[in-house]
Amino acid sequence: MKGLSNNQINRWRNASSRLLARLWPQDCFVCGEPAGEVAVCAACKNDLPWLDTDFCPVCALPTPGAQECGQCLRRPPHFDATLAAFVYTHPVREMVLALKFGPVFAVRDVLVGGLLTALGALRADCIVPMPIHKRRIAERGFNQSMELARDLGRAVHLPVRAELVVRDLNTPHQTGLPIRQRRKNMRGAFRCVESIAGLHVLVIDDVITSGATLDELARTLKLAGAARVTNLLVARTLREKD
């Protein structure tokens, strides 16, 4: 594939994956039983860890009565709302990692289906996938949030503005760091290249843990004029608060 861009390579891989799925039946990603053209059989799809309890409308942590949680009341983030399809646990965790590091494009349809369910009737003006630094693009070959955003944009007829925000800082992995350090690491990581005055921006990412990265992205979007920022995530971790 010499001479092709990363986007062209990803489109080729995706088309090939979908063609192979139609030609050769797949085994279910979860149970291993024949699943036909889909990555997860109907029975396992119903048993996925959907985030179907009451949750904080701002950060999506489970909260009695779907009230805003204490953390968001004490320190309101720059984003206005968060929607998540699943709890970040087995087998969704393995599906996200398969897409992120595989990439296993077959599971993408399941994850995008989850995003559509979580989104419901909510409407926005545009979609912004979580940007990753150019070095990580070079290492990985693609941005998994961009792949999810592209499919979602087609499904809901919204423009995907991947070029709107640039990630200037190649921040270290945040896993295991305290929330204050995560926020410090992310400060100034993003740059919005044009005004988006008055727009409702839908940010797409795979997982929310501390929310520090999403908060900094929302801050950047608000500085560029965004009227509202809503996060739409595949999954929500429940191990720590924002």
Image (spheres, helix red, strand yellow):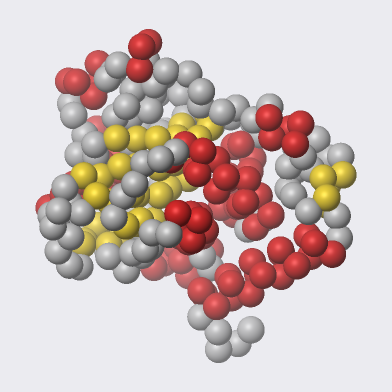
Q: Which quadrant would residue 42 be assigned to in this image? A: top right
Q: Relative to residue 94, is residue 26 depicted above or below?
A: below
List the single residue furthest toward the bottom: 3
Q: Residue at x 87, y 44 (%)?
A: 34
Q: Which residue is drawn at 75% across and 67% down?
A: 19
Q: Is residue 48 left or right of residue 172?
A: right
Task: Please give the name of the residue rendered at 83% of the width and 50% of the height, measured from the top-left corner.
Answer: 36
User: Quadrant location of residue 50?
Assistant: top right
Picture residue at 27% right of the left edge, 65% below the top: 164
Query: In this view, which residue lies farthest toward the front?
Result: 121
Residue 240 horizontal side relative to residue 222, left or right: right
Q: Can residue 207 be seen in this view?
A: no
> Quadrant of the image for the C terminus?
top left
Residue 154 visible, this angle: yes
Measuring from the top left, give residue 18's x and y in whole percent.
71, 63
Give the percent coordinates (x, y) of residue 151: 52, 58
* Camera-side residue of 172 and 57: 57
User: In the rendered picture of this protein, how many numbered marks are placed on residues?
Assistant: 0
Depth order, front residue of 240/230: 230
The N terminus: image quadrant:
bottom right
Judged left or right of residue 13, residue 179 is: left
In x, y percent, where is residue 120?
44, 38
Q: Where is residue 35 in the image (x, y as percent from the top left)?
A: 82, 45
